[in-house]
């Protein structure tokens, strides 16, 4: 069975090498300070006891007040999987460093996150839209993206009687 | 006298038989040699991840049929496993075995398609693929028997499978697995493995070293063809894979030919798994009861019931015929996922396409793309 390295464990390992690089650690994932991301990822990839050489998945999440980029990493030799995250609080111009120099496989996935969520990956060699065409208005996976022609009316819930994500205050940013 | 050449651009696709769907490869050529390759995708982008955020967990299962429509069973399986991880459901033993059987039948069907179309790309126009589609039909008959649909099966459920198989299923599947398919595979191996045209077109073409393959997040038959013995079924057994005996098919050279050979070998291994699974499958229920805390009405107390996983996140991955298929789901406790992300192997396996193609010829680009075995529905989602 693949052993899951919890966010707390991986945060502990990172802390030993890079003090104060971990912003927050919960069992699901360790959140890394964006400024230190590339050196932390290089450490996770190259450290002989970790060897997270395989970037399984990279994706973004719109957390309403911020954006998260989520990385799932695998170490084949030790049969381990772990998850790290980066957070950016800037909704208007979200930007995180690109990990393409660490894992070339991040290239297409970062372009996807840029296309659908509008997160800028600084240092990406070729950051263009990938599924939608250049000039497409907005980034559809954002929670405040208007899914209906007239736009979601303020207060329209996803299910009748169920509170949805509070999009009212976000509408102004689109 | 030297001939002067200058680079020019060729668009391969979006409508082109060897792009396996609406996918465009924009290549820059110098004479016959590829200097640059750029992928243009999104022609089949249906915004599944956004749509899934506005539907309940159960309503999202049919979407997973339609991402990788050549292997719908494995798409279903990966998604329900992610939700089960989130909710914490125990799946009954018989359902686990049924999932194993369906996933392996699906792998056979999908590899039939992959190998047949690959032979097409090599110039063996239509004959091998027609033979292989004949076998795939038999597997789709079994799916129809189990769930009423052949392609978009919608068979897996959170906590089990939609219904038990009819009594005729096991004898028919056993006949397919023990009598028909092994003979057919012998035939295909004789026809294709040593085939002079296939060997000439694919040996030493599109080579990917193990280091390059891992760095580019490549998975599935591509990764194994490069000599990395990594298979999620072995490394992180799900369903009933820990109870069956099989080997990981591994290549040596990481070229197009090895990918094709690995797929042929994997079909043999799938038959091995199926033989065991069809004998070992126990009797019992195929769905499990989920606690009332996770199934709550929508809106009013008399509203329709829906899954409400506790707030949190889960990432589950399986070995689909194309590679590591993962689902990352974030729940906020509402009836719909807050975030629904598909780690699709077809999309990510395209990462090293430029690396593999540059320096080759146009004819090489066709077989390289064929060896990646993309399904555009899964690339674009």
Image (tube, grey):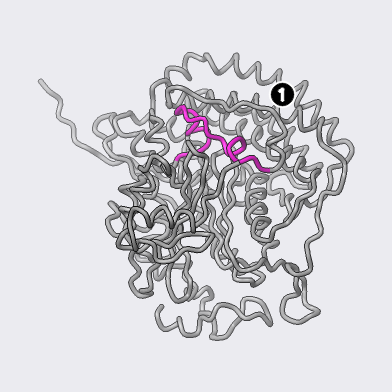
Q: Position of residue A27 (x, y in %)?
A: 54, 60
Q: Give the structural element (helix, strand or loop) at label 1.
A: helix
Q: Position of residue B369 (x, y in %)?
A: 44, 35
Instruction: Look at 64% across and 44% down and name the residue there.
Output: B74
Was residue B221 drawn as part of the magenta stretch in this picture? Answer: yes
Q: Residues within 10 Å of mark 1 (few under 14, many from 20)?
A: some
Picture quadrant of residue B173: top right
Q: Which chain contains the residue that carries disc 1?
A: B
Q: Tag count in the figure?
A: 1
Q: Is residue A141 left or right of residue B137?
A: left
Q: Residue furthest right?
A: B167
Q: Quadrant of the N terminus of chain B?
A: top left
Q: Please check the rendered image and state whether residue B226 is part of the magenta-colored stretch, yes or no.
A: yes
Give the magenta range.
Answer: B218-238
Describe residue A41's horizontal placement relative to residue B342 as left or right.
Answer: left
Q: Is residue A47 above or below residue A171?
A: above
Q: Residue A136, how many percent across, how many down?
A: 39, 66
**Residue visible at 42% across and 23% down in the picture:** B253
| Residue B13 appears anywhere in the view | no
**Residue appearing at x 84%, y 38% in the figure:** B282
Tell me the quarter of the picture where residue B213 sits: top left
Q: Could you tell whether B280 is left or right of A30 in the image?
A: right
Looking at this rendering, what residue extends furthest in the front direction? A16
Q: Position of residue B305 (x, y in %)?
A: 77, 70
Q: Is residue B341 visible?
A: yes
Q: Which residue in the structure is indicated by mark 1? A: B181
When the figure is inspected, residue A117 is found, relative to residue B240, above or below; the finding is below
Query: In the rendered view, would you say A1 is above or below B186?
Result: below
């Amino acid at each position: 069975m693949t052993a899951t390295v919890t966010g707390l464990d991986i945060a502990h390992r990172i802390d030993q090498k890079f003090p104060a690089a971990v912003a927050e650690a919960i069992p699901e994932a360790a959140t890394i300070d964006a400024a230190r991301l590339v050196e932390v990822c290089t450490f996770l990839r190259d450290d002989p006891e970790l060897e997270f050489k395989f970037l399984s998945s990279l994706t973004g999440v719109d957390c309403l007040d911020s954006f998260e980029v989520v990385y799932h990493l695998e170490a084949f030799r030790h049969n381990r999987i772990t998850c790290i995250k980066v957070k950016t609080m800037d909704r208007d111009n979200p930007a995180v460093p690109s990990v393409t120099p660490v894992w070339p496989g991040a290239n297409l996935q970062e372009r996807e996150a840029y296309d659908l969520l509008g997160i800028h990956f600084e240092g990406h060699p070729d950051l263009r839209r990938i599924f939608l065409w250049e000039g497409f208005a907005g980034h559809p996976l954002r929670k405040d993206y208007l899914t209906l022609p007239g736009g979601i009316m303020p207060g329209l819930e996803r299910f009748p009687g169920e509170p949805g994500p509070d999009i009212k205050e976000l509408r102004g940013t689109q | 006298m030297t001939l002067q050449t200058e680079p020019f651009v060729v668009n391969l696709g979006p409508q082109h038989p060897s792009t396996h769907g609406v996918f465009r490869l924009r290549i820059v050529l110098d004479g016959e040699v590829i200097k640059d390759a750029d992928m243009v995708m999104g022609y089949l982008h249906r915004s599944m991840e956004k749509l899934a955020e506005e539907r309940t967990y159960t309503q999202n299962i049919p979407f997973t049929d339609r991402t990788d429509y050549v292997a719908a069973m494995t798409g279903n399986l990966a998604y329900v496993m992610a939700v089960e991880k989130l909710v914490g459901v125990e799946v009954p033993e018989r359902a686990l075995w049924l999932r194993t059987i369906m996933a392996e039948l699906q792998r056979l069907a999908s590899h039939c398609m992959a190998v047949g179309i690959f032979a097409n790309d090599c110039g063996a126009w239509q004959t091998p693929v027609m033979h292989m589609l004949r076998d795939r039909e038999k597997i789709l008959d079994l799916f129809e028997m189990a769930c009423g649909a052949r392609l978009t099966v919608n068979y897996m459920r959170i906590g089990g499978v939609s219904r038990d198989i009819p009594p005729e299923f096991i004898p028919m599947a056993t006949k397919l697995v023990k009598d028909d398919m092994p003979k057919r595979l012998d035939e295909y191996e004789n026809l294709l493995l040593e085939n002079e045209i296939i060997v000439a077109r694919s040996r030493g073409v599109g080579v990917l070293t193990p280091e390059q393959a891992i760095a580019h997040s490549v998975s599935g038959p591509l990764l194994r063809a490069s000599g990395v013995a990594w298979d999620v079924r072995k490394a992180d057994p799900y369903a009933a894979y820990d109870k069956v005996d099989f080997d990981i098919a591994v290549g040596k050279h990481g070229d197009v030919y090895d990918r094709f050979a690995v797929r042929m070998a994997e079909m043999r291994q799938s038959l091995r798994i199926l033989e065991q699974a069809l004998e070992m499958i126990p009797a019992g229920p195929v769905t499990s009861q989920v606690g009332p805390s996770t199934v709550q009405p929508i809106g009013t107390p008399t509203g329709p019931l829906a899954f409400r996983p506790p707030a949190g996140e889960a990432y589950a991955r399986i070995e689909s015929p194309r590679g590591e298929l993962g689902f990352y789901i974030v729940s906020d406790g509402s009836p719909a996922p807050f975030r629904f992300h598909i780690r699709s192997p077809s999309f990510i396996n395209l990462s090293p396409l430029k690396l593999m193609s540059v320096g080759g010829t146009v004819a090489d680009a066709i077989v390289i793309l064929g060896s990646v075995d993309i399904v555009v529905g899964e690339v674009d989602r």
